[in-house]
Amino acid sequence: MKKLWLLILLLCGMVTLSAQKVDPVVMEIGDKKITRSELQYAYLKNNASSYNERRKTVEEYAELYRRFQLKVAAAERLGLDTVKAFVSEYKNYRAQLVLPYLTDKHAEDSLYHEAYNRMKEDVQVQHILLRLPANYTAKDTLAVYQQAMDIRKRAQKEDFSKLAQEVMDETVNGQPDGYLGWFTGGMAVYPLENAIYNTPVGSVSKPIRVGNAYYLIKVLDRAKAHGKIRCAHIFVRCEENMSAEEQRRAYDKIVKAQNELKGGKSFETVANEMSEDPRSATIGGDVSWFGVGMMVREFETAAFNLKAIGDVSEPVKTAFGWHIIKLLDRKGIDSFEDQKDNIRKMMEYDGRTMIVQQYLVEKLKKEYNFLFDKNSWSRLVTALNGLKVNTKDYDFKVKTLTSTLATFSNRSLTQKDFAAYLKRVTPEKNALNKDEMQAHWNRFVAQEILAYEDSQLEGKYPELRYLLKEYHDGILLFNVSSHEVWDKATQDTAGLSKFFKEHQGDYVWKEPHFKGRICCCKDKQTGKIVKRLLETAPKDSINSYLSTRINLDTTKYVETIIGLWKQGENKVIDRYVFKQNVPDDPTLPKELPFVFTYGNVIRIPEVYTDVRGAVITDYQNYLEEQWVKRLEREIQTVVYKDMVRTIK
């Protein structure tokens, strides 16, 4: 008996779970079905009550949503969802909105904190750089890597600086010994930063491949982050290509500047008078804030060795010349929250975003059951190795490739797919090799998996699907409403006039208005002439008559202002029409002192332009109601009220 009850309970649970997964239809608009979850999302998001507005019931909101979707359906019937401008706008919006869904948040947060923790420590390093030859092959890559390993082995016993001078063909920052100086988090690309922070003091890293070169990193020292300092300097140019006499004069000048300081002159004054740095001399020598790795070695060392604010260094020689440095201020690193935006920008270019992407790709491989055929890969590498992609041999070999390299979800990646990708991304002059093909394969797989994941996002994340639909439908509603209602209401003057005449009584003012002109004249005699003209001239010719028959080319005799005013809106009208004791309007032209009004006091607007804004609004509402009625005749709608009521 107990087993029977247990079985019944399990079956009930299964029925409940099954029912929970069902998303019933609550309304149909033409051939479009609106589900309960969609209506519930819109209701909960958009139905927050305000101070003066009652919260709508589900049934009331469902009716508003039905009308909304009816208009969207009309927009789609007109093809507004296929217009280039709409497609582009929606595509750009979606691209921004899906970014958080195409990243591994855990990996991203981990790298954020790793970057910040590294900012707390500075590392002093040297390096040896070994470049790959132009148009290098796999054999070249292996040879340079082996050379780097041999040098690393020698570095266990030999002086690293001498090795750098022996094997490198170039100097960095003018340092032939490979000295790079102090580094802090975010200053190097991610692979090099890892070597810098993961190598013990006194040790040399394994060869690190970055671009077309291998690097060996030697860590000289570690220290708590120096932070940033703000300094000023007095600079005298003194370069190696200058004559001995010029160099002597430069030295004498910096010594003179030092003596001026010791004699009591302010640093700012001496910098302004003697410094040869045009950017900083006029502001007291201030070179603003900087951190480690931002200045040449000698300048940086001398600046960070200054202890107290206001300390001044002895003359310091760099490749550019002589400097006397003053410490203006010092600060540590900012908090994690303050640095987070900078770290995000840094991650976009230093390689960390690729690490985040790799984490996501590996996770998606497991989710989509990614299977890789090693034998198929081996045959492809054998067939294409050493070929250039723009040759007939390449095209011939590709025709023989018919196998599948990998599968995931319901997708297959074939040898031909990858060969076509190689042709797009490989420079025509480069011959393919195994290492390059492997790197391209990794990128190809990442591209395909991420593209597939992108196509599945709306199905995996309902909140994203609803947000995108809301934006999609909102743009269409705006566009179709402009087409069917708003533009018509503002441009249809005949329709506005007819609508106004049919509803003129709805626009009676509570307060009287004056409709007419304010006339400013040169004198009383001109005023009489203007008044006679206003009474006798055709209405459509008055402005022309005033400008041609009264005003002259060189002298203005009259100026009029046409308008519609109620009491309190214009001082002239208040004084001359509504007989209020108000001062003269100071904005009227002083050269036209004789002022009078011409027009009528009315309580009912005479034409629609008297109440244009209100008439346009009401006409829009009228057009919208007529439009909706027409749509309801053309597009069948069904609302399942019992199902609507299940929304809480």
Image (cartoon, rainbow, N blue to C red):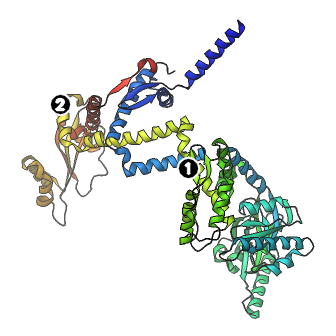
Q: Residue furthest front?
A: 400
Q: Is residue 505 left or right of residue 275?
A: left
Q: Can residue 188 be spotted in the picture? A: yes
Count neighbours of disc 2 (C-alpha within 10 A) and say few if under 14, some if 14 to 19, many if 20 or more: few
Quadrant including the N terminus: top right
Three-letter residue code for mark 2: Glu
Q: Which residue is mark 1?
A: 451
Residue drawn at x 75%, y 81% as measured from the top left: 169
Q: Is residue 450 left or right of residue 589?
A: right
Count of labels in the image:
2
Numbered disc in front, either 2 or 1 = 1
Q: Can residue 303 be spotted in the picture? A: no
Indicate the secondary structure of the residue bearing disc 2.
helix
Q: Is residue 216 above or below residue 1?
A: below
Coordinates of residue 62 in the picture (x, y in percent): 42, 25
Q: Which residue is mark 2?
A: 502
Residue drawn at x 90%, y 76% as measured from the top left: 159
Indicate the secondary structure of the residue bearing disc 1.
helix
Q: Is residue 108 above or below residue 506?
A: below
Q: Quadrant of residue 211?
A: bottom right
Q: Quadrant of residue 70?
A: top left
Coordinates of residue 178 in the picture (x, y in percent): 80, 75
Coordinates of residue 612 in the picture (x, y in percent): 25, 40
Q: Residue furthest top?
A: 1
